[in-house]
Every structure is written in C-alpha cells, then in structure tokens.
Amino acid sequence: MASTEFLRITDLHSFYGESHILHGVDLIVNRGEVVTLLGRNGAGRTTTLKSILGLVGRRTGSIVINGVEAVHLPPHKVARMGIGYCPEERGIFASLTCEENLLLPPAVASGGMTVDEIYAMFPNLQERRTSPGMRLSGGEQQMLSVARILRTGAKLLLLDEISEGLAPVIVQALGRAIRMLREKGLTIVMVEQNFRFAAPLADRFYVMEHGRIVEGFTAAELEAKMGMLHEYLGV
C-alpha cells in the first residue's frame, strides 16, 4: 500500500508559540484522492494544512510526502516537493493584473497546466485577465487563488475553505474544477465548512475535533455516518 500513498501524517503535534493546537494527528492521503477534513471552527483543520507546509511555530511527529520525511523541512523545500497551497485569505496582489497574479508563482515541478488550459477551466479569469486584483470579485479572486497553483506543477493541492462566502454559481464552478483536477490525477486535501459542497467531491473524509482526528470514513460510508456528523458538525 505504501506506493499508493502520497501523504502520511503520524502522531503530528503542532504549536503556535506556547499554544498546543494539534494533539497527535494521524491521516493518510492516497494518490489521486480528494480527502476532506471536516470539523467545527477551531478544530485544527487549517493548522493541519499549514503544518504540512511548515507554516506553524513548531511540529513534532512525522509528515511523509511522496516517501520523504518532511516534518523538519522549511516551507520552501516542502513546496518544491510538489505541494500547492490555497490559503483561506487568498493572498491576491491588488496592484497586479489577474494574469500577472496567475504567472507569479514559480514552477515547483514539471507538468503544470498552461495558462490556456487554466483559462479553459476558469473562463471568468480569461475575461478579467487585464483587470487589477483589487477589481476582481470575491469569486474571481478565489478562482485565481486556486488557478495560480495549477501552473506550478504541484501534485498535491491543499485547499482551505475555497467555497466560503461565494455565490452558488461560483461554488459550482469550483466543484467542476476539482472534479477535472481529480481526473487529471492530482491529489487534493480540502478543509471545508460547506458540507454540501464537499460531500459529493470527496473520496474520503476525516473529522477533527480539539486538534485530533476523531473519525475517518469513505464516501460509500457517508450515509451511515450522517448521525455522527450531525453530532460533531451540526449538519
């Protein structure tokens, strides 16, 4: 089974200063899977994504990416292992055009999507390619935040709350994009509060509470787990 794994996290503890946020997280993400981390705000889901990249104060435990231990590596070296991160705050540069934002991140691996391929996936961005980042709508900024990591050649995408606060038509477009990326063989870990958005996209789910994984199950088990999800998430 090891050859199918892209990411294995074992006994991960993460800290911001003196604050102990993750308390022994264990999870596996296989190649080509979409895995969703569910949980209430403050459960540790975003910290898990940031911990994979090393964007926390301190980490202990094990984070194996594509067979390589990465828990002690700095963020720029983790990114060059083929990791693309789409943060909740988007991080669009206001003074740069849409296309300049898109072209800004460097390639970390071969096989990234071309600008034309990205525009085919997100036609809104092609229409707005000369518009400054500050003029883009929230939905367009979110599309851009996802799109710019696709050029880099990253094979594992970490997506943090990409549907939050967006119009339904934009959420549907992002859902179509995730399906297309999975068909291309990319591996995706999503943090999502929008259960209706995440449920049809994910192959597997992990539920987090108080910095721990409390449940893991497959899409096929989702219906049987709805009572448990209601208890943990209120869905």
Image: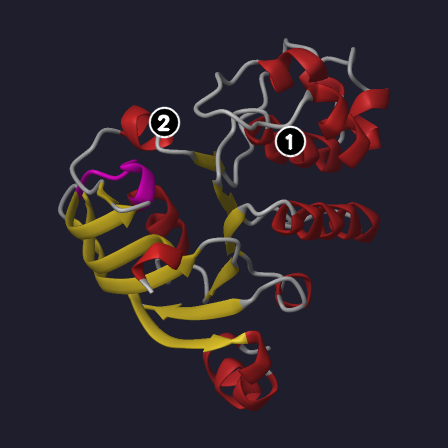
Image coords of residue 156 (percent x, y):
46, 43
At x 34%, y 49%, the residue is: 47
Q: Is residue 148 left or right of residue 3?
A: right
> How many circles with numbers are drawn on the protein?
2
Part of the protein shown in magenta: 52-58
Residue 230 lies in the magenta stretch: no
Q: CA distance from mark 1 to mark 2?
A: 18 Å
Could you tell which of marks 1 and 2 lies nearer the N-terminus?
A: 2
Q: Give the amino acid at mark 2.
A: Arg
Identify the residue under disc 1: 147
Q: What secondary structure is found at the residue carrying circle 2?
A: loop
Q: What colouring method underlies this structural image?
A: secondary structure
Give x and y (percent) for residue 73. Answer: 20, 33
Q: Nearer the viewer, residue 39 or 99?
A: 99
Q: Which residue is mark 2?
A: 80
- Residue appearing at x 34%, y 52% in the figure: 48
Amino acid on which disc 1 is placed: Ala
